[in-house]
Each structure stands twice: as C-alpha cells, then as structure tokens.
Image (cartoon, rainbow, N blue to C red):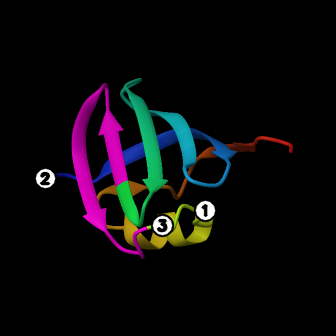
Amino acid sequence: MNIIKVKSIHWLGGLCPTQAEGVTENNESIFIKYRDGKLRVDISNFLIFSKKIGEDKDGDISYDNVVKELFNILDFSNIEFTKEEM
C-alpha cells in the first residue's frame, strides 16, 4: 500500500473518542478515531487501518501519537492543521 498524503486535518479532539477529519491530496475524506484503545482510519468511508494500541477504556490520544502510529500509512508532512477549540 502506498503512503497517502494528507492535505488538511481538523483535529476534533474529545475524549472517548478522540477524532479528526481531513482530506487527502486526492480530495478523499479522512476520518481518524481513537476509542477503547483502538486507532482506526477511514478513507472515503472505507476502513484502511485498525489497530489496538491502548487499554480497553482508553479514548485519549495526542495528535503527535497519531502521527507516530500512522507514519507508514499517512504522510502528515505538508498539511494544513486546525484544532477544535474547547
């Protein structure tokens, strides 16, 4: 699988789940969710990644940790980043 280049990401944050949405360079939608220790990525409503990386009731993950976990799937190097203000 080729690494998918991310054009923009909007970090919605939250706790249980932590979520983000964005767009690839090919204008496909991205949805990232971390809930119950599982990180999942959907591109255009298709699951492309799902992995248990935390404890069962864990729902909080930082943007930096998401980037680290997805380095071989998504390229975040040239993105427009926005964050939801709480």
Mark 2: few, some, or many residues within 10 Å (few <14, many ≥20)?
few
- Report how far apart the C-alphas of labels 3 and 1 lie in the structure: 19 Å
Horizontal placement of 47 versus 39: left or right? left
Q: Which amino acid type is marked by label 2?
A: Met
Decide if residue 3 is on the left or right side of residue 81.
left
Q: Which structural element holds mark 2?
A: loop
Q: CB under 8 Å between callouts 1 and 2?
A: no
Q: CA distance from mark 3 to mark 2?
A: 30 Å
Q: Quick check: marks 3 and 2 in contact, CB under 8 Å?
A: no
Residue at mark 1: 63
Q: Which amino acid is tagged 3? A: Lys
- Discs 3/2, front: 3
Residue that lies at the very extreme toward the front in this rendered image: 57
Image quadrant occupied by the C terminus: top right
In the rendered view, would you say 54 is above or below 33?
A: below
Of circles 1 and 2, the one toward us is: 1
Relative to 30, 1 lies left or right:
left
Element type at mark 3: loop
Where is residue 72, by image quadrant?
bottom left
Vertical relation: 72 (above or below) 9: below
- Can you identify the residue that label 2 sits on? 1
